[in-house]
Image (spheres, coloured by chain):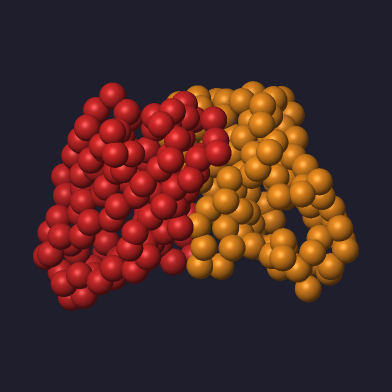
Amino acid sequence: GAGVSQSPSNKVTEKGKDVELRCDPISGHTALYWYRQSLGQGLEFLIYFQGNSAPDKSGLPSDRFSAERTGGSVSTLTIQRTQQEDSAVYLCASSLDRKETQYFGPGTRLLVL
Amino acid sequence: GENVEQHPSTLSVQEGDSAVIKCTYSDSASNYFPWYKQELGKRPQLIIDIRSNVGEKKDQRIAVTLNKTAKHFSLHITETQPEDSAVYFCAASITGNQFYFGTGTSLTVIP
């Protein structure tokens, strides 16, 4: 079946602009996770959803970052007033339940000029 | 919060030799420990995982061991092949809420 998909695959934006990243999880997966991966670095946990709820938002780097999930499916990660340090690959993962295996999407490569 | 440390950051082995990557964690409540393989430009993929109720798990050439007392877990790859070359990440989680990843180990298998 279809895996996790993310869009856009690449995004170049100017400093100060807002961007919206989208994640389509595997159908039926209730848990959804967002991570950030800077070049040559590990994965930084940002936020997770169980259904439409995000129990813990403390991983978000700043108040410029927000995320939502609707209908227990698609999730969007929004970065307002982007800064150059926001440049990274943003990865989304989903799992059947939060105790199960995570499957990653291909990521969105964000470049802030 | 949880802190996961991973060593070594780079590892080179001859084809056919074994490779071992070690991770330590700080939060004794962590109970799920997956390992991911990430090839260049690709998404991370789960290769093996272990839960805190077992000490070892094996899947063909890959095995993971967990020492809850010492709070460390290790990935063992035997009979390495060139296609094993990738970056490997360990992670720790408390019942799948937040996942904390190590900084990665770049493994190179020399033919």
Is B110 on the left-hand or right-hand side of A59?
left
Kindly identify the residue that appears in the image at 64 percent across and 39 percent down.
A47
- Which residue is at the front of the view, B30 or B98? B30
The quadrant in which residue B87 appears is bottom left
Asked if residue A97 is positioned above or below residue A32 in the image, the reply reads above
Q: Is residue A50 above or below residue B83?
A: above
| Chain letter, colour red | B
Q: Which chain is orange?
A: A
In the displayed structure, does residue A81 sit left or right of residue A92? right
Number of labelled discs? 0
Residue B92 can be seen, yes or no: yes
Residue at 21% x, 48% y: name it. B62
Q: Quadrant of residue B16?
A: bottom left
Residue B11 horizontal side relative to residue A15, left or right: left
Residue A91, image x and y in percent? Answer: 58, 50
Pinpoint residue B38: horizontal percent, then vertical percent. 41, 58
Please indicate whether residue A11 sits to the left or right of residue B60 in the image.
right
Q: Nearer the viewer, residue A23 or B44?
A: B44
Q: Is residue B86 visible?
A: no
Q: Residue at x 72, y 65 (%)?
A: A85
Q: Residue at x 26, y 49 (%)?
A: B75
Q: Position of residue B110 (x, y in %)?
A: 21, 75
